[in-house]
Image (cartoon, rainbow, N blue to C red):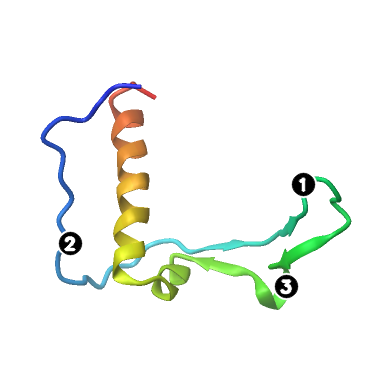
């Protein structure tokens, strides 16, 4: 995989913008026994993105943003 050089992400002040939201539903199951549900996030337990980001600490948000932005940049320039 290619390396990013002189790459940085700087947290800025919050912005109020209108963006789409997504409802994410499913179940996390044991890989060996898929009848064993570890977490159920269907119905009322659905995860709403991007609202779910507010449940993360600032440090966790920064890590998540770095992963997503890196992937977006690589896709944008046809690397990934």
Q: Are marks 1 and 3 in contact (CB under 8 Å)?
A: no
Label placed on residue 69: none
Residue 43 percent location from the top left of the image: 72, 72
Q: Quadrant of residue 1?
A: top left
User: Please, what secondary structure does the residue beneath circle 3 have?
Assistant: helix
Q: Give the CA distance from mark 2 to mark 3.
A: 33 Å
The residue beneath circle 2 is 11
Q: Residue at x 40, y 70 (%)?
A: 56
Q: Residue at x 36, y 30 (%)?
A: 75
Most extreme residue toward the bottom is: 44
Q: Give the CA distance from mark 1 to mark 3.
A: 23 Å
User: Please, what secondary structure does the residue beneath circle 1 have?
Assistant: loop
- How crowded pointer 2 is (Cα within 10 Å; few <14, some 14-19, many 20+) is rated as few
Residue 6 percent location from the top left of the image: 10, 35
Report whether 40 appears left or right of 75.
Answer: right
- How crowded pointer 3 is (Cα within 10 Å; few <14, some 14-19, many 20+) is rated as few
Q: Residue at x 35, y 72 (%)?
A: 57
Label placed on residue 31: 1
Most extreme residue toward the left is: 6
Foreground mark, 2 or 3, reads 2
Q: Nearer the viewer, residue 37 or 19?
A: 37
């Amino acid at each position: 995989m290619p390396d990013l050089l002189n790459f940085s992400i700087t947290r800025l002040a919050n912005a109020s913008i209108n963006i789409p939201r997504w409802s994410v539903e499913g179940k996390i199951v044991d890989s060996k026994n898929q009848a064993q549900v570890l977490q159920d996030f269907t119905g009322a337990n659905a995860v709403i993105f991007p609202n779910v980001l507010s449940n993360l600490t600032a440090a966790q948000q920064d890590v998540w943003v770095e992963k997503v932005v890196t992937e977006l940049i690589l896709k944008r320039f046809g690397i990934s």
